[in-house]
Image: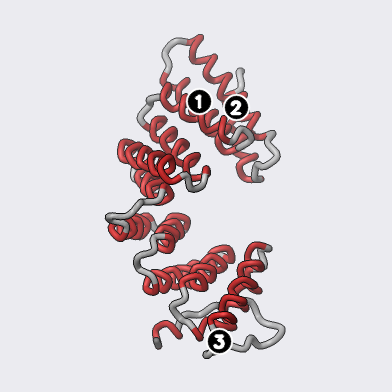
Amino acid sequence: MKKLMAILFLSSPLLFAVEELTDASPEIIEENYQKALAAYQNRQYNESLDHIRHVIKSDMLNYKLRMLAAHNHWRLGNAIPAEQHFRTAIEGKPEELGARIDLSLLYLETGSSYKAEKAARDALKAGEGKSIPAKLYNVLSRISLQKGDAKAAIEYATLAKGAYEKNQVGIKDQLEAIVLEGRANIQLQDFSSAEILLSWASEIKPDSAYIINLQGYLYEQWAASENDATKKAELRSRASAHYLKAASQSDISVELKSIAEANAKRTAAP
């Protein structure tokens, strides 16, 4: 319990002190969780943490409160307390895979590839005999890509697609699996397979700047491997067109727009 009490919320300076209840009823805890969730959905992350702080001492292993606290800190860029809350969520419900998967994703985002893989494999082990979510296979596919193991990335992406088709939980997971498999095929220089996969991804989400830019990258890499001058020029032209299309999408981030524009300029015909 002392270890749990040491976990800090590190929210912004408060205009008023948050009363930290130690004997809140399950109903009061749920009421504050719902308020915290609403604040999180409105991107009011510190306010969300305040609602959690109000009742967390009454149920220190509450899975929902810990998960929400972790995601608030993640959004605020507080990686250490986010990690601590995920670990406490796992301690409270070791059979739940969600906290393990999200912990792995947190490690991936913060550049801790070794920790990310360990957390993902711990989740896979904890899920033995259960229905493994597509999201976990996608995490393992991403880790494999980072390690340069394209074949393993394809294997995990294939498992993710199968898990999605079985459970139908979140089209986002299916889309990510398709994109990951496409990226792996680019690494393997199987450009025809990558083209089919990314075309499929584009059908699912036709206005995705990321996918369109990735298609541009596919054609650029394909062109670099081509010896025929006519074919090479055609592929570079397709690459440039996709980069320009990506840069024109309304959902594109400032960073990706800059990259896509630079890509388009680089692949444009002289």
Point out the tag, 2 or 3, that comes first from the N-terminus: 3
Q: CA distance from mark 2 to mark 1?
A: 10 Å
Q: Is label 2 or label 3 in front?
A: 3
Residue 18 lies, with reference to residue 92, above or below; the image says below
Q: Is residue 92 visible?
A: yes
Q: CA distance from mark 2 to mark 3?
A: 56 Å
Which amino acid type is marked by label 2?
His
Q: Are marks 1 and 3 in contact (CB under 8 Å)?
A: no
Q: Quadrant of residue 190?
A: top left
Left or right of 143: which side holds 249? right
**Residue beneath disc 1:** 220
Which amino acid type is marked by label 1?
Glu
Closer to the camera, 207 or 159?
A: 159
Which amino acid type is marked by label 3?
Ala
Q: Quadrant of residue 236?
A: top right
Point out the tag, 1 or 3, that comes first from the N-terminus: 3
The residue lying at 43 percent from left, 71 percent from top is 89
Q: Badge 2: how crowded within 10 Å, few (<14), some, or many (20+)?
A: many
**Residue beneath disc 3:** 24
Point out the tag, 2 or 1, that comes first from the N-terminus: 1
Give the SS element for disc 1: helix
Q: Is label 1 or label 3 in front?
A: 3
The residue lying at 35 percent from left, 68 percent from top is 94
Closer to the camera, 94 or 78?
A: 94
Q: Are marks 2 and 3 in contact (CB under 8 Å)?
A: no
Instruction: Indicate the position of residue 1 as horizontal and vertical percent values.
Output: 39, 86
Left or right of 171: which side holds 91? left
